[in-house]
Every structure is written in C-alpha cells, then in structure tokens.
Amino acid sequence: MSHHVPGTTARPGADGADSAVHDGAAPGTAGLAAPVPVAARKDTVPAGAPEAASAPAQWAAEFAGTALLVFAGLGTGMFATEVIDSALGFGLGLVAAIVAFGHVSGGHFNPAVTLAAVVAGRTPARAAIGYVVAQVLGALAAAGVLWAVLISLLDSSTTAQVLGAVSNGFGENSTSQAGWTTVLLVEFVATALFALVVLGSTAPRANAVLAPVAIGAALAFLLTITAPFDGGSLNPARSTGAAVVAGAGHLGQLWLFWVAPLLGGLVAGLVHRSATLSRPRRGAGAPAAEEDAPAAEATPTASAAPVRER
C-alpha cells in the first residue's frame, strides 16, 4: 500500500509500488536523478520521464547541448582579456545546456562524462558511441560557425591566430610552455574531479535542482586552473572542434586531449561505483529504498537518460 505525497505525481513502479515525481522542479534535471519510492524521496525531479525520448532525440540533444557549450566557451574566449572570462563562458554555457537539453539526454555533452557514466553503471555501453559521435559533431558545428564569422571579418592568418588562442595544446601551443607530461597530469586530475562532481551531484540522494549549478561552477573553476597550462579542456569534443578549425599545429597534439580526459572519466567512474557499492547498509529499520541500486541493477535501459542511477 502506498501513500500519495502532496506536490508529487504517483507513478506505478516495476514492482507495483508507486513512485513519486515532484511537480515544479527545475527544468533540465529529469535525467539527473533516479526515482525512488515515496517514503525515501529527498530529491526533486520534474515530471516528464526522459525514458520517453528516443535514441535519435537523445543524440540530437547531445549535439545541440555540446554545440551550445562550445559556442559559448570558445566565443567568449576569442574576445576574453582574462582567463576567468572564458572559464565562465564554458561554465554558464554548460548550465544552460543542462537545463535546456538535460531532460532529454541526461546532459553529458562530454565524452569523458559519458565514459564515467558507463563505468559507474549509469548508462549502457551500447549507448555511448551515439552520444560521443553527437558530441563531437556538435563541437565541430559550433567551431565551424565561429570560424565562418571570423573569416568574414579577418584575414585567414589572423583568424588562425584567434582560433589557436582558444584551442588546447602543450609546448609551443601552451602559454606557459608546459610539456606534454605536465598537461597530461593536469587534464587527467581536473577531468577526474569534474566527472566526480557530475556523478555526485546527480546521485539519487543529491539535490537535482542544484545539479546544473554545481556542475557548471566546477567546470568554470577547473578551467581557470588548467587554462594557463593548456588552454583548459576537460572535454575531448571541445578540443576536437577547436583543433579542427585552428589548424595542423593543434591537430597534431589533439591525442593528449582525448587520452587524459578519458582516463580521468574512467577513474572517476570507478571511484564513484566503488564508493556506491561499498557504502554500509542501514539497519533493518531504515528504508531500503534509500540505498543506491546495486551494480546488477544500476544500468538503465537503452532509452533511459544516461546519467541516471537506478
């Protein structure tokens, strides 16, 4: 027997019990936290389950969200006078993308986050390829638009210089002349921390309303730290879009900005999964539903939002 809680919409669960979805929650967070039985509910999730979205719709959301993120970040960086300007452009762009498209796809917009979600048991591995392809295409589209705008105003040499300034690199392409080993370490650590923030702030017992703000703020301050070393990436799709329009000098160094962030995402996923599985069980009197789902049940269906935990 279940009881309806005011301000929620009761929905039948797989075992016949009702689960609740809070009305009036912030948009864009439906894919960021999993429904649990009413008695244990502490987070806020808007109505409109993302499971209803088809795979093409999720790919389109990842394309659009990544394009918005890259357009905001690179566009701000091209005319920025301080590192914080570009970092805020990326951070606020990510908040907007999560709110606008997160309820459709779960709001990854980053191959490293997608890998972390797969390893943590939030999304099936078979869905990752479509997400990553959509993210890279979105980044390329945004970078291409910015290139077209610049080339209509500036000569090709100046355009290449401007785009090179917002691209990622090491050695001669780093403002601090940082070597590849230093940049590899910086990107690995920063991406791992960022992915942990994403996974932690979207866990079932986290406040889903604050998740976009926490994630955007984490990206902004981590980019502020990494930018002096390599321009600040934490996102292979972002680096790919910028490198393609910046030219061969940056394309030759692109490999590092795939390897380091993906390693960071992998480690973050493993750490989060380990912490979830090793969490001590509550006593017999505590509601069992407040515990995170075990590993065997953590992978959502193919149509579910990828960052969800079940």
Image (spheres, helix red, strand yellow):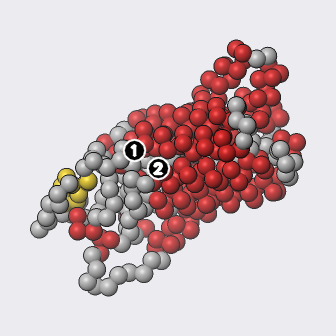
Quarter of the image for the C terminus: give it: bottom left
Instruction: Name the residue nearer the viewer: 58 or 204.
Output: 204
Q: Position of residue 94 (x, y in %)?
A: 53, 43
Tag 1, which secondary structure? loop
Q: Position of residue 15 (x, y in %)?
A: 21, 63
In the displayed structure image, the side of residue 11 where residue 183 appears, left or right:
right
Callout 1 crowding tier (Cα within 10 Å): few <14, some 14–19, many ≥20: many
Question: Could you say which quadrant of the image residue 300 lies in?
Answer: bottom left
Tag 1 and tag 2, C-beta contact below 8 Å: yes
Residue 135 lies, with reference to residue 162, above or below; the image says below
Query: What's the mark number on residue 81?
Result: none
Residue 103 lies, with reference to residue 6, above or below; the image says above
**View extreme (front): residue:** 81
Q: Residue at x 55, y 52 (%)?
A: 217
Question: Visible in this render: residue 25?
Answer: yes
- Residue located beneath label 2 in the image: 212
Question: Could you say which quadrant of the image residue 93 lies in?
Answer: top right
Question: Visible in this render: residue 308?
Answer: no
Query: What's the mark number on residue 28?
Result: 1
In the displayed structure image, the side of residue 164 where residue 1 appears, left or right:
left
Callout 2 crowding tier (Cα within 10 Å): few <14, some 14–19, many ≥20: many
Quarter of the image for the N terminus: give it: bottom left
Q: Position of residue 195 (x, y in %)?
A: 57, 57
Q: Amino acid at mark 1?
A: Gly
Q: CA distance from mark 1 to mark 2?
A: 8 Å
